[in-house]
Image: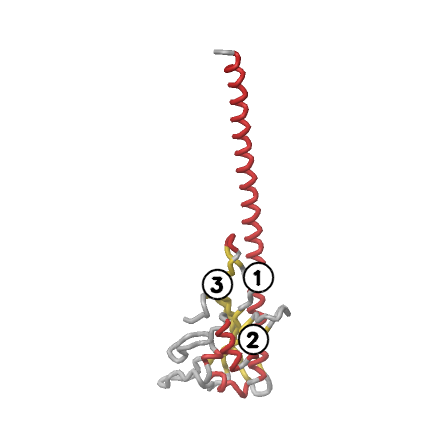
Amino acid sequence: MSPRASSRSPRGATLLLVVLLVTVLLGLVAGVMAYASSERTRAVTSSRAGQRQGCAESGLQLARGYFGRNYAQWNTFLSTPDAYDPIGSPTNTTPANPRTAAGRTAIKTVNPALFADLDGDGKDDVYLYIRDNEDEFQPLAPEWNRDNDQQVVVGAICISETLIPRRGGNNQQDPSALAVEGILQYNGGGHAYTAQTAGGTGSGNLNH
């Protein structure tokens, strides 16, 4: 072997080792950055999940106040479920869809008070709704457009674009909706709100 060939061999081996070390280091850095990004995403998602829960619960309190003050209009509200009730049913075939611009426009044409801005950014954060409870006795069929026992179900859906979680690394809004609701009872001398409260998530406009 010539002296020139002998001198090249160690240099080539050293260069290959440097390339391998740099590759390993770059992989480690990329792994650390990916882990940090995923942890940040999880933290933001967790934080916004709490914000969305608070958003819906705040909306429920607003629904309690609004529909409680307007007891005299309950039957008017119940007879217009396409604007006041997001839950689809045989008697509510075109339910309100407060999660789309077209849906919000249609609902606001009926009653703009069904929306509220919670964080002062000028955008709607919650949609307030009302529907009848099952207050007829057999053999009478349920009459969802009329209240018979001075009790209704009121609730709120968080529709905020800023108070909801986002998914994965694409920063897309979580499409699931969060609704919180309870029974509102009119007692004649004032408005009492019972303790039963329920919440749930769903997709779209919560049509079941």
The residue drawn where x is 53% and y is 58% is 166
Image-quadrant location for residue 123 = bottom right
- Which numbered marker is on residue 115? 2
Q: x%, y% of residue 193? A: 56, 78
Q: Which residue is mark 3?
A: 175
Q: x%, y% of residue 168? A: 50, 53
The residue drawn where x is 60% and y is 72% is 117
- Left/right placement of residue 90 relative to residue 25 reads left
Between the residue at mark 2 and the residue at mark 3, the CA separation in whole angstroms equals: 19 Å
Q: Secondary structure at mark 2?
A: strand
Mark 1 or mark 3: name the one nearer the start of the chain: 1
Which amino acid type is shown beneath numbered disc 3? Answer: Pro
**For the residue carrying disc 3, how many other residues have a C-alpha within 10 Å: few (<14), some (14-19), or many (20+)?**
some
Q: Secondary structure at mark 1?
A: helix
Mark 1 or mark 2: name the one nearer the start of the chain: 1
43 is higher (above) or lower (below) than 205:
above
Total numbered circles: 3
Q: Which residue is mark 1?
A: 50
**For the residue carrying disc 2, how many other residues have a C-alpha within 10 Å: few (<14), some (14-19), or many (20+)?**
many
Q: Secondary structure at mark 3?
A: loop
Which amino acid type is shown beneath numbered disc 2? Answer: Phe
Q: x%, y% of residue 83? A: 48, 79
Foreground pick, 28 / 48: 28
2 is higher (above) or lower (below) than 65:
above
Q: x%, y% of residue 129? A: 51, 77
Which amino acid type is shown beneath numbered disc 1? Answer: Gly
Between the residue at mark 1 and the residue at mark 3, the CA separation in whole angstroms equals: 16 Å
